Image (cartoon, grey):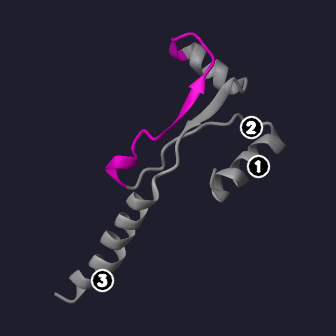
């Protein structure tokens, strides 16, 4: 777990806020890498009630470092080079 997620978990638990997982994806390969497990029936109302009761568990995986490095290179370095062309 990364530092930001650790802080978010600590914040939520201290305040009794249900925890969720979501991929804050900045590029296609990371979409769906994190998600929320919800202990409920499959109906939308049941899912909402379960989330509000805290019957959730964040799950998934961190974005692999090679994808992060590639994205930084593409956005920062190559983006700056495009400004000069």
Is residue 29 placed above or below 77 in the rendered structure? above
Region in magenta = 27-44
Q: Nearer the viewer, mark 2 or mark 3?
A: 3
Return the x and y of residue 38 as percentages of the image width and height. 60, 22
Quarter of the image that includes the C terminus: bottom left
| Sequence-first disc among 3 and 1 | 1
Q: Are marks 3 and 1 in contact (CB under 8 Å)?
A: no
Q: CA distance from mark 3 to mark 1?
A: 37 Å
- Front residue (pair 9, 1): 1
Res 17 label? 2
Q: Name the residue: 35% across, 65% down.
A: 70
Q: Name the residue: 72% across, 27% down.
A: 54
Asked if the stretch drawn in magenta spans residue 51, the answer is no
Q: Are marks 2 and 1 in contact (CB under 8 Å)?
A: yes
Q: CA distance from mark 2 to mark 3?
A: 41 Å
Secondary-structure class at tag 2: loop
| Sequence-first disc among 2 and 3 | 2
Q: CA distance from mark 2 to mark 1?
A: 8 Å
């Amino acid at each position: 777990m990364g530092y930001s997620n650790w802080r978010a978990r600590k914040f939520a638990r201290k305040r009794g806020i249900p925890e969720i997982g979501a991929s804050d994806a900045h590029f296609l390969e990371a979409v769906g890498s994190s998600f929320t497990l919800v202990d409920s029936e499959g109906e939308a109302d049941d899912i909402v009630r379960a989330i509000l009761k805290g019957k959730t568990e964040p799950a998934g995986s961190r974005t692999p470092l090679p994808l992060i490095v590639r994205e930084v290179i593409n956005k920062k370095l190559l983006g700056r080079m495009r400004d000069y062309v």
